[in-house]
Image (cartoon, rainbow, N blue to C red):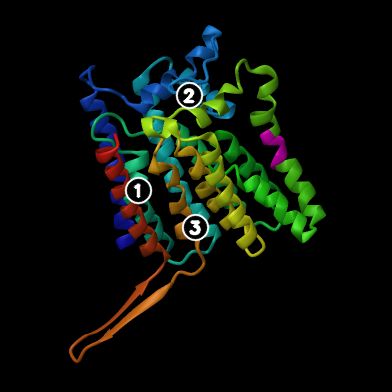
Amino acid sequence: MLGLLLIIIGISIRIFMLIYYYIVHLDPSVSWGDLRINFNTTNTMFTGEWIWAPTKLEYPPLTLYLLVFFKFISFGSLELFAFYAFLLELLVSLSFYFVLKKFNVPNIILVLGVFLVNPFIFLNNVFSPLNCGYHITDSFFYIFLILSLFYYLDENKSKFYLFSGLTMCTKWFTLPAAPYFFIKFLLEKDWKEMKKFIIFLGVPILIFLVSPLLYLPNYIDLYTGWLSGSNIPIFNEISIFVKLGLFLAIFLGYLIIRIKKADFLEITFFSIVVMFSIMFWRRLYVRYLTPLVLYGHLKTNENIFTIDIDFKIIHVNFRVGNNLITYGFSILGCLAAIAIIIFIF
């Protein structure tokens, strides 16, 4: 009953936010925020300039192609584009149910409800008090991530590799997982699985991340830009070697300490932490870590520790599991994001 109530609340607040955005944006002076930026992101593709810079072509090509498609079916209407952003976020969030079911997570309805009202998910992907909180490019990322998780438990992991590759091609959040997978196969001498991995994960990366170097003008600027500039002035003074040093330290530390014992699910989500260590220099956004919420609900150890309090008049058995801990860390993530906005921006 509680789970169903949380699901209804989660869907309702998303519908409310859509209506809220339409109402407040009746005033043309109110900014549509990142949604307008995403709407205009691909403009330089058609003017022939191909400017790979903030607010311009700042995403991998697959995401740009998806933006072109949704802008096309929006018929030039930002309001319709906003509806697609709402619809994608809602459908992707609800589709997590099928992943939970595939993983045989107990109390699926309750877990999905908790996920839908998770403050980190909602505040990063839906809500913004000043403009519009939708990040449609993140929804593109989640579409393929959800699909890869859905096929993760299949004995034949070809589809998992394929959608993992496409996930990396929409956003770079999970890109470090590719070399981790490769090294793990080498250590285990699993040549048969290595072949599948190279074909099904490697081909999307080759098509959407590597081959554009050959035909897209100024494409290399996309990557050099992420390592050079920053929206925080003090970060611009930090050497590129320091930035790469932190990235390599975390990457190699996990490789040495954990890679042999880790499964592909853990590697996929830890790769987000690795990528965060380099991406935050450009933009200090805690929301880059939002996908970790999915992992928090898929952990197999649902009862991490138990608090048992026995009084004469009452007996309390309080179990702290992965869902509650995930919710707690989500609140901390929101507080961290608010602190950054207040004290840095």
Please state if 165 lies on the left or on the right of 280 as rendered.
Answer: right
**Residue 222, image x, y percentages:** 55, 25
Report, in whole angstroms, how far the alpha carbon at label 3 lies from the one at label 2. 28 Å
Q: Which mark is residue 100?
A: 3
Is the magenta region chiefly helix, strand or loop? helix
Magenta-drawn segment: 201-205
The residue positioned farthest toward the left in the image shown: 313
Residue at the spot x=72%, y=36% of the render?
203
| Residue identifier under label 2 | 70
Closest to the camera, between mark 1 and mark 2, is: 1
Kind of residue at badge 1: Phe
| Residue identifier under label 1 | 120
Q: Is residue 68 above or below residue 171?
A: above
Residue at the spot x=40%, y=69% of the render?
321
Closest to the camera, between mark 1 and mark 3, is: 1
Kind of residue at badge 3: Leu
Whether label 3 touches label 2, CB < 8 Å:
no
Q: Earlier in the sequence, mark 1 or mark 3?
A: 3
Q: Is residue 234 above or below residue 317?
A: above
